[in-house]
Amino acid sequence: MVDIPKNKKIILFDGICNLCNDAVLKVIKYDKKDHFIFVALQSKSGQDIITYLKIDVSKIDSIILYEPGVAYDIKSTAALKIMKDFGGFWVLTQVFEILPTPIRDYFYDYIAKNRYKWFGKKESCMIPTPELKAKFLN
């Protein structure tokens, strides 16, 4: 299993998706309390975590928020929990929790299904800058 730092929540993301990479950079910017660490779904560490959690990625084309020892969340629920940890005005995004998960996930899935067409993709996963390297699992 992957060596996971204590007291961190892991965000597994599509490493070749431009939208996903931009979202990771936004999370890093707003993660003032340093709650999160990142790993691309396509990486060896990402695959190890997915196997450990017994997640079938052919059925879940999504961001995964994994809180070791607690649980994992996917899709809109994961996104809302990530934004909640930012604090400040981001707490207002929690208003979307009043919507049933299937409705939130319908919109999430629509964007996810079209993300490559709308935002493009890279040939390989993002390589973090030296300053950001500590925010990523190897």
Image (cartoon, rainbow, N blue to C red):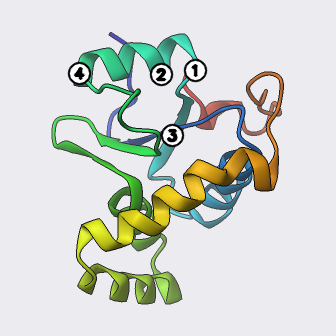
* Three-letter code, disc 2: Gly
Q: What element carries label 2?
A: helix
* Three-letter code, disc 4: Lys
Instruction: Give the numbered dot on residue 54.
Output: 4
Report the residue marked by disc 1. Answer: 42
**Residue 31 appears at what percent x and percent y?**
56, 61
Residue at (17% x, 35% y) in the render: 69
Left or right of 126 on screen, residue 60 = left
* Distance between mark 2 and mark 3 Cα atoms: 12 Å
Which quadrant, please, contains the C terminus?
Answer: top right
The numbered mark, 2 or 3, whose residue comes first in the sequence reads: 3
* Three-letter code, disc 1: Gln
Q: Is the residue marked by circle 2 packed among few (<14), some (14-19), or many (20+) residues within 10 Å?
A: many
* Distance between mark 3 and mark 4 Cα atoms: 20 Å
Quarter-wise, where is residue 85 in the image? bottom left
* Distance between mark 2 and mark 4 Cα atoms: 12 Å
Residue in the foreground of this view, choosing between 35 and 92: 92
Report the residue marked by disc 2. Answer: 46
Quarter-wise, where is residue 87 in the image? bottom left
